[in-house]
Amino acid sequence: MLEVKDLAVTAGGVRIVDGVSFEVRPGEVLGMVGESGSGKTMTMLAVAGLLPATARITAGTATLSGAELTASRLERIRGRQIGFVFQDPATSLNPLMRVGTQIAEVLRIHGVGRAAAMQRAVELLEQVGIGPERAKVYPHELSGGMRQRIVIAMAIALRPALLIADEPTTALDVTVQEQVMRVLRAAQRETGAATVLVSHDLGLVSEAAHRIAVMYSGRLVETGTADQVLGSPRHPYSAALMRSRPRIGAGRGPLPVIPGHPPAPKSRPPGCAFHPRCPVALARCAQEVPPLAGGVACWAVQDG
């Protein structure tokens, strides 16, 4: 379904995303995780052709159903074959348009008539758990969770083959997060879309994803099934992320943390970008970038 090969994104002469490759099969949910600034969102914006003006793809390809996602093709299929759920519905919804009209607009852009588009918009509202009478309200009249469900309705309006959800529960409380994720999972099952769930919330990803891709400093460092990565992580960074999760019943005391800070893209160290923070780094780690081999990019693992 979706296949990304050696993707590189540059902004201001600096590589933000550096040689990322992965695939997502139909009906599968890929969880893309990592600390803030690891390149998760920029990777998926590049796939969807939504990069900011300051950034551009400098290498690699992305294909959907075997056809390359060129700029001209993305203009035609974005919305129809690719749905995007942005992390902040307060800024992704037009405050001057009623929500029903905004959902219908997605359909009308792709050739659906006015009456049919409005009827489908009402159906989508019901599908995401919002009463049809809400079609006439403006975004500011809805809660954050309801606004996010409106964005999900817009993303699935045309039953896309690929659904990208970028931090869909940001700034929502735990109860509302669960409601939004329930709607997103139901929508994904309904459409059968290949889905990429971008998040730094490991608990959320563990409940929704079939496979997980871990990013660090613009590169993939580990991929595998959710059980493999969450239960038996092999890359030292993945393992450190798992240890840093809060646990019920762990008692009082400081939480485990990863020492140091992720490097800024312009000051990424040579070799493996994680090596200054890594407890098992080898001399080779500071000199050569490890390839993603067997699902892990780590010289200590590969040489061991």
Image (cartoon, rainbow, N blue to C red):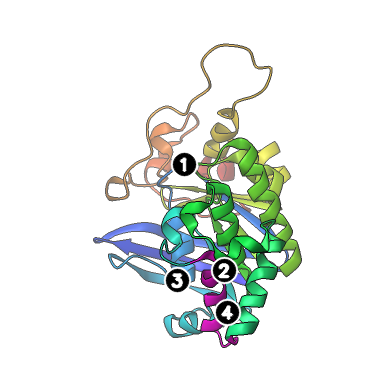
Verify whether residue 110 appears in magenta.
yes
In the current view of this chain or complex, which residue is farthest to the top?
252
Checking the image for residue 35, the label placed there is: 1
Q: Callout 1: helix, strand or loop?
A: loop
265 sits to left or right of 65 = left
> Gap between marks 2 and 1, in whole Å?
35 Å
> Which dot marks residue 60?
3
Q: CA distance from mark 4 to mark 3?
A: 31 Å
Q: Is residue 31 above or below residue 250?
A: below
Choose between 21 and 138: the one closer to the eye.
138
**Overall secondary structure of the magenta stretch?**
helix
Chain part drawn in magenta = 98-113
Residue ID at (57%, 75%): 104
- The answer for how far apart the CA atoms under marks 2 and 4 are is 11 Å
User: On the picture, is 234 further left or further right than 73?
Assistant: right
Between 26 and 148, the one lying in front of the other is 148
**How many angstroms separate mark 2 from mark 3 (CA)?**
38 Å
Which residue is painted at 41% across and 58% down in the image? 18
The residue that mark 4 highlights is 107
Per the rendering, the mark at residue 304 is: none
Q: Earlier in the sequence, mark 4 or mark 1?
A: 1
Q: Position of residue 103 (x, y in %)?
A: 56, 70
Q: Earlier in the sequence, mark 2 or mark 1?
A: 1
What is the quadrant of residue 123 in the picture? bottom right
User: Callout 3, which amino acid?
Assistant: Gly
Determine the CA span between mark 4 and mark 1: 35 Å
Q: Which residue is mark 2?
A: 100
The N terminus lies in which quarter of the figure?
A: bottom right
Q: Earlier in the sequence, mark 2 or mark 4?
A: 2
Q: Report the amino acid beneath label 1.
A: Glu
Q: Quadrant of the C terminus?
A: top right
Q: Would residue 275 appear left or right of 155 to someone viewing this image?
A: left
